[in-house]
Amino acid sequence: MKQKFNFKPLPMLVAALTVADHFEAEKQVFIDEKPSWGDPFIATFREAVSQVMNDYYGVNTKEELQKQTSLVNELAIRTHDDLAMVKTQIERGFRATPERGEWVIAKLGFKEYWSKASNSNQSMLIGLLLAFRNNLDQALRNELEQNEVNPVRINNLLSYADTLNKANITQESLKGSTKLDTEKAVSALNNIYDQAMDICAIGQQLFKNDKLKKELFVFSKLVKKQGTAGAATSVETETPPEGTNAQ
């Protein structure tokens, strides 16, 4: 038996729990559309997800992963805001000497990493932070401040580099702690994924005229928010099965 989805199992399970949360927030709308989804439908679904997480990852690992995921997401948001502001301040501060400004932008890693980092690519965000920290000597920092780049923002970015990198390493090591190597495990994962996708498919139709609510039921985005987009794998093989597509 092969895994149906193109995500690592644990981020998929975390996303499934998020789907359950979003379902409960709009529970009556779903039940009006599908009466069979009345109680205890979502409670049973949540229990199935939790059972797999407990059986194959352990309660402590699950709780630590959720904590680390929350930390990484929070740090990523704050980091992105500071990077965007510093980049803008460099561009405006060096407007009288644009060639120098472009050199500074490249020196600090924005040219290489910013495009992907600004599109929720966690590894590119960390790469940019590390480039910023490693290439910012005192002379360049003085030059930035002389051109009205906020020193508090600079300090924030220097502190985030190691913090975010360590949190990300911890998060990834937890995701790799699995025992999902049996047909029973794959079957349980596939069932959870199918149910989550059922909820997402109906949710997207119910809220097709409400963009914000509709996006709460785009499963791939729920996985991507954990910084794991593109990290697809199968329980049985490192290559995702042919013909399978995540939403």
Image: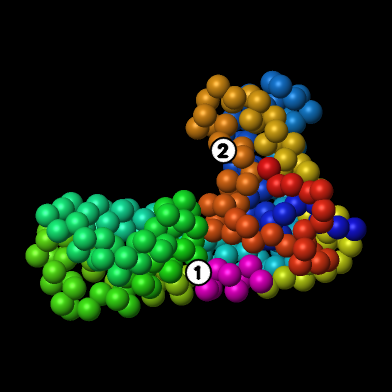
How many C-alpha atoms fall within 10 Å of the one at disc 1: few (<14), some, or many (≥20)? many
**Numbered badge on residue 168:** 1
Residue found at x 61% / y 37%: 217
In the displayed structure, 10 sits above or below 221; it is below
Query: Magenta residues?
Result: 169-176
129 or 75, which is in the foreground? 129
If you read the primary sequence from the N terminus, does the residue marked by circle 1 or circle 2 appear first?
1
* Majority secondary structure of magenta residues: helix
Q: Quadrant of residue 52?
A: bottom right
Residue found at x 46% / y 51%: 119
Q: Magenta includes 175?
A: yes
Q: Is residue 172 left or right of residue 99?
A: right
Q: Is residue 206 left or right of residue 113?
A: right
In the displayed structure, 14 sits above or below 151; it is above
Amino acid beneath label 2:
Leu
- Where residue 183 appears, as percent x and y from the top left, is 89, 62
- Where residue 12 appears, as percent x and y from the top left, is 67, 54
Q: Magenta includes 90?
A: no
Amino acid beneath label 1:
Asn
Which residue is at the far front? 99
Q: Quadrant of residue 143?
A: bottom left
83 or 106, which is in the foreground? 106
Task: Give the quadrant of the N terminus.
Answer: bottom right
For the residues bearing labels 1 and 2, Cβ distance under 8 angstroms:
no
Residue found at x 70% / y 25%: 31
Mark 1, secondary structure of its residue: helix
Residue found at x 36% / y 56%: 80
Residue for badge 2: 216
Q: CA distance from mark 1 to mark 2?
A: 24 Å
For the image shown, how many numbered marks are present on the structure? 2
